[in-house]
């Protein structure tokens, strides 16, 4: 059993923002279940039939149920084999496979040796049942948020572990005690995240709690003669969250102006999801990026006047470097607790 975190590790501001739960800060599994077991079981009894039905409907990227399960199982085998070859860590090729499956992009860290070293450290924690520090270690990588971190952890052992993303969090939105959510909703393209747990420590703590919640569900179904993996319930929650999104959340929020609209487009520069009104018709990027570009140009002009730029060629090189931005998704935007992706200047 892991030790409770000292509250001095978080600031007063973070302490206040983690107030969705009655229990603030990291606690032991025993303390968590003492506080929330009854709430978890009450929610489960209301939703057990839906969970079982949704489990059979799981699908990812328009693939059949059988194909979707097969691909997940192949990724689990790939992680196992990679860990055997890399002293407990996984290699860049395996990390890329997971990210391509989950996000359609490669893993953000491109140094093969560092990928192995960091994942080695993460899995040392995971193998000991310390999912908080396991997730937090992976999120120390720039561009890795809770969804990416838990895809690596969750797919490594589907019997005991799960993925924590916005759809899973949204499916559990009505699991509450005194109006407070037991498991907050992470950021996502389809769901608005809960603002209380925007720090990486907060999301890592909530992942640990999610695993404990799913363990209670496994015990409940086992007592009824039903044998499931934790990943099976996670996939059911994923489908429940996706279905609720389609039914109740047809409007999405523009990341630039904050207006609710039905269809968003992606800014080609910063990858934010924006409405058509926030696309500059001349530059072809969002208005926020236009302001950033303008400010960048003013600064470059001032630098030339002050003799800080050696030549106009250097200025032009810097200008074009600004436009070379990688595509960012909600996981990367989450890195610094900021809901908007911003150009790196």
Image (cartoon, rainbow, N blue to C red):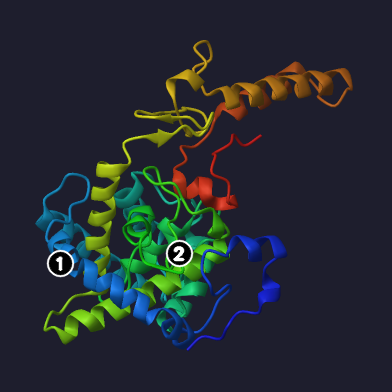
Q: Nearer the viewer, mark 1 or mark 2?
A: 2
Q: Looking at the image, which residue is at 10% across and 58% down?
A: 66
Q: Looking at the image, which residue is at 54% across and 39% down?
A: 341
Q: Position of residue 151 (x, y in %)?
A: 36, 61
Q: Secondary structure at mark 2?
A: loop
The label on residue 49 is 1
Residue at the outermost right position: 306
Q: Is residue 202 visible?
A: yes
Q: Position of residue 208 (x, y in %)?
A: 44, 73
| Depicted 42 relative to depicted 65: above or below | below
Q: Position of residue 56 (x, y in %)?
A: 11, 61
Q: Nearer the viewer, residue 295 or 11?
A: 11
Q: Which corner quadrant holds the C terminus?
A: top right
Question: Badge 1: few (under 14), some or many (20 or more) residues near its Cα, within 10 Å?
Answer: few
- Name the side, left or right, on which 305 lies relative to 210: right
Q: Looking at the image, which residue is at 48% across and 34% down?
A: 272
| Depicted 189 relative to depicted 177: above or below | above
Q: Nearer the viewer, residue 181 or 4?
A: 181
Q: CA distance from mark 1 to mark 2?
A: 24 Å
The label on residue 179 is 2
């Amino acid at each position: 059993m892991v030790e409770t975190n000292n509250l001095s590790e978080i600031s007063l501001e973070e302490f206040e923002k983690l107030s969705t739960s009655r229990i603030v800060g990291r606690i032991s599994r025993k303390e968590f279940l003492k506080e929330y077991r009854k709430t978890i079981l009450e929610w489960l009894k209301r939703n057990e039939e839906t969970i079982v039905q949704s489990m059979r409907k799981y699908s990812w990227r328009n693939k059949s149920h059988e194909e979707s399960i097969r691909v997940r199982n192949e990724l689990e085998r790939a992680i196992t084999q990679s860990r055997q070859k890399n002293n407990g860590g996984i290699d860049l090729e395996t990390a890329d496979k997971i990210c391509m499956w989950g996000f359609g992009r490669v893993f953000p860290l491109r140094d093969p040796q560092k990928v192995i070293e960091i994942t080695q450290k993460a899995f040392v924690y995971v193998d000991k049942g310390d999912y908080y520090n396991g997730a937090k270690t992976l999120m120390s990588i720039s561009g890795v948020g809770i969804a990416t971190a838990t895809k690596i952890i969750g797919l490594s052992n589907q019997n005991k572990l799960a993925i924590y993303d916005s759809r899973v969090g949204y499916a559990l939105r009505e699991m509450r005690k005194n109006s407070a959510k037991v498991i907050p909703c992470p950021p996502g393209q389809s769901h608005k995240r809960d603002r209380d747990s925007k720090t990486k420590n907060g999301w890592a703590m909530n992942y640990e709690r999610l695993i404990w919640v799913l363990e209670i569900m496994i015990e409940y179904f086992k007592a009824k003669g039903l044998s499931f993996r934790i990943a099976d319930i996670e996939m059911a929650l994923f489908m429940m969250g996706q279905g609720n999104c389609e039914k109740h959340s047809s409007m999405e929020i523009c990341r630039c102006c904050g207006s609710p609209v039905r269809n968003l487009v992606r800014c080609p520069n910063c990858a934010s999801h924006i409405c058509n009104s926030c696309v500059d018709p001349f530059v072809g990027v969002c208005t926020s990026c236009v302001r950033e570009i303008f400010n960048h140009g003013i600064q470059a002009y001032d630098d030339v006047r002050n003799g800080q730029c050696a030549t106009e060629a250097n200025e032009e090189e810097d200008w074009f470097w600004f436009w070379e931005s990688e595509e960012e998704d909600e996981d990367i935007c989450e890195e610094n607790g900021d809901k908007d992706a911003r150009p790196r200047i």
